[in-house]
Image (cartoon, rainbow, N blue to C red):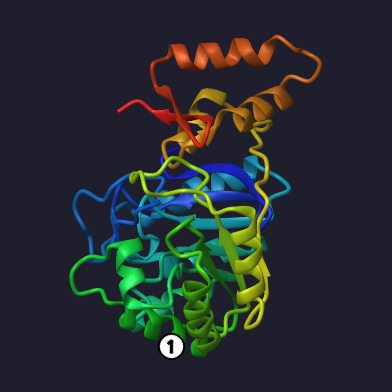
Amino acid sequence: MKYVFGPVSSKRLGQSLGVDLLPPKSCTWNCVYCQLGKTRKFVTERQEFFAREEILEEIREALERHKGLDWITFVGSGETMLYKGIGWLIAEVKKLTDIPVAVITNGSLLYLEEVREELLQADAVLPSLNAGSEALHNQIVRPAAGLTFRQHLEGLVAFRHEYQGRLWIEVMLLGGINDSDEALRDLAIVLKEINPDMVHLVLPTRPAPEQEVHLPSDERIERAIAILSEVTTVVNPLKGNMDLRNAPDMLEAITAIVSRHPVQQRELQKAIADCFPGENDKTAEVMKEMLATGRFKLVEHNGEPYWVMQS
């Protein structure tokens, strides 16, 4: 499938069917930690990159194929809300199924009334907020010209006032960058102003484009939870498991996931092993065949091998 991938699993969203609305990489930010790599050219104008009817048809087909889904998640190879017409897609998906809809976004376009309006029908919206100060915000996300921290914050506050669904803010915690007590207290101040339903701490576990990106220590993670919990509920998500058991074509399913983010090799090994219970040698054989296609290569990050697409 061109637009739909997964399901993938996480503590936050359980078994989630992903819908990618963008050509890679279309983004308003150039985050130091981005698993998609550097933003070579900023995109700030919203447009309908792909025909909405084609995307909806793929979602319809995937819903017939996959059972037991917990969420349908709109996400982009960049900034999701650059896709003009996502509101129509959310409304049409809700006509097809009772499965709740989530949207993962960096939140940089929430200052636009039309963007906020398109998101009102979503059951959960997960925007990013990684800093409580302009200087640190700019250091981490490196936004396109004209997109300011104040604008970002005001967009989040305005959306909170209008939105009745679940607002779950994602905070990427970076070792030595935004995990100091000072940075965390600044972040707590702006989170209190936004008043989200929950904060999800996320960690840079996948390969990043910049060498200064490191995992925070366990002590800093616990400190972040303690400080941010003073103003809102904080969840430190545990990684879920990829599920390939219903994939009609395993190679294409893995390609669809790896093309959107690096995949830890041991996570992939488990997902393949689950497809062949009792066949101990099958997993290694399948993985060898996958690598032999030339689509993938292995890279190391934090001592762990990851599968990424061949460039």
Image x and y of residue 151, in percent: 31, 82
Image x and y of residue 305, in percent: 52, 28
Name of the residue lying farthest toward the right: 278
Q: Is residue 276 above or below residue 96?
A: above
Mark 1 residue type: Ala
**Residue that numbered label 1 is attached to:** 158
Residue 247 in view here: no
Q: Quadrant of residue 224?
A: bottom right
Identify the element where label 1 is drawn. helix
Is 174 displayed left or right of 142 in the figure? right
Q: Is residue 171 above or below residue 4?
A: below
| Residue located at (32% from left, 77% from top) | 134
Closer to us: 275 or 61:
275
Q: Is residue 150 above or below residue 234?
A: below
Q: Is residue 98 above or below residue 207?
A: below
Image x and y of residue 193, in percent: 51, 89
| Residue located at (53% from left, 72% from top) | 181
Image x and y of residue 77, in percent: 37, 50
The local crowd at label 1, few if under 14, some if 14 to 19, many if 20 or more residues have their Cα within 10 Å, is some
Residue 243 in view here: yes
Quadrant where the C terminus is found in the figure: top left
| Residue located at (41% from left, 36% from top) | 259
Is 61 displayed left or right of 222 in the figure? left
Q: Quadrant of residue 97?
A: bottom right
Closer to us: 226 or 73:
226
